[in-house]
Structures are given as structure tokens and as C-alpha cells.
Image (cartoon, rainbow, N blue to C red):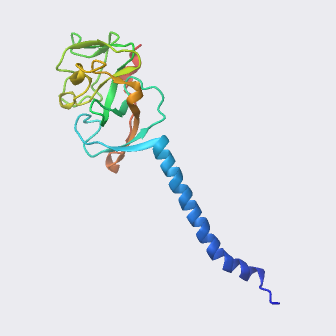
Amino acid sequence: MTVEPEADKNKKSGKGGNLRESLFLLVCGVVVALLLQAFVFQSFWIPSESMENTLQVGDRVVVNKLHGDAERGDIVVFKGWNDEDTIKRVIAVGGDTVKCCDAQKRITVNGVPLEEGSYLYPGDFPSGDAFEKVVPAGRLWVMGDHRTASADSRAHEERKGEGTISEDDVVGRAVAIYWPFSRATILSRPESFLKVR
């Protein structure tokens, strides 16, 4: 009976073991990535100018699907009025009164004027249409940052919910632009919304 030195035995079995281990880790990585995409994070591509300059055509954003309740100022992806993935900014939530416009031509939420200069498209105005809505419970009033190029809640007032969207239709909150790399940034809630009660 022949015997092999322990070191030689480990060398022979190590090659197959390393391959199996590598394949196992690769499969685990793919499974984890698929689970994260299905339940936690998802990537979306921006196809239109309705959220400029915050989001540009061709930007790719990461959306947190475990976002909790949408809040005023959040940028959210939702199943839109035509059942397509749509991205807009939440201006008002259930129970809020949203109005356009005050004497300084600002949108107000519960009587508090929004200072939108930090995200509104340069040279654009808060709204060309006058409106006043009490947002129903469980629904959101959403608008694009490029107001003159956005078919948002204002353009769908004749539909169920009077232009608002259901909170249940929200896929998630956009948390960051990750591509192109030169535009990579975290997307945060503007301070103006923190004053609304």
C-alpha cells in the first residue's frame, strides 16, 4: 500500500475544492444581488426631461424599495397614470392642502410657501396652472422639477384621485444618481419641505 505525503494530497484536492468554492461563492453572490434587486434596491433609467435639472435624460438612479412612507420632497418612482414606471417629486401627502399660487407665485402646502429655487428648472416657474387640492388620505400630489415639461398631478386632475397617486403605487424612493459617474450624487429632501406641518 502506498501513501502520499499530506502536502501532496492537499495540493491535488485543493484545485477541485477551490473551483467548487469559487462557483458556490459566485452563485451566492448572484442570488444575493437578485434578492437585493427584487426586494431592496432597483436601478432606473431617466427617459425624459421632466425632472431636470435634478435628473437628466440618461441618468441612472438607485431606488430604495424599502423606503417606508413617502414624505414631502422625496423623489419617488411609482406606477404612473398609464401604468408605466414614472419618477416625480412628492409635493404634498394625504391630508395636505396644496395650492398654486400665493402672491409671490409660490406653491403652498398647508399655507406654507415652498422655496423651490434649489431644484426647480432654471427659468421655470412653480406652475402655469392655478389649482387648490386637499390630498386624500393614502395619496400623494407629485410634480416634476421641470414644470413646463412635466405631465404630473396637474395634468391628470380629471382622473380618479384628481391627479394624486396612491401610496400603494410607489415602487420606491430615489436615493442616488450613480451614472454617469460625473453626475453621481446622493438625492436628499430639500429644506423647504421641512417647514411644512
Q: Is residue 109 above or below residue 67?
A: above
Q: Is residue 126 visible?
A: no
Nearer to me, 45 or 109: 45
Residue 108's quadrant in the figure? top left
Estimate the x, y position of residue 94 in percent, counting from the top left: 39, 16
Residue 7's quadrant in the figure? bottom right
Give the residue displayed 25% in from the left and 16% down from the top: 106
Q: Is residue 41 visible?
A: yes
Circle count: 0
Q: Is residue 189 left or right of residue 28?
A: left
Estimate the x, y position of residue 150 in percent, counting from the top left: 22, 30
Estimate the x, y position of residue 43 in percent, counting from the top left: 38, 45
Estimate the x, y position of residue 12 in percent, counting from the top left: 67, 80
Give the residue displayed 77% in from the left and 84% down from the top: 5
Identify the image quadrant of the C terminus. top left
Q: Is residue 11 left or right of residue 53?
A: right
Give the residue displayed 23% in from the left and 34% down from the top: 50
Nearer to me, 84 or 55: 84
Identify the image quadrant of the N terminus. bottom right
Q: Is residue 28 left or right of residue 111?
A: right
Nearer to me, 158 or 174: 158
Q: Is residue 131 above or below residue 11?
A: above
Q: Is residue 85 above or below residue 22?
A: above
**Quick one: which residue is furthest to the bottom in this view?**
1
Nearer to me, 154 or 146: 154
Give the residue displayed 71% in from the left and 77% down from the top: 10
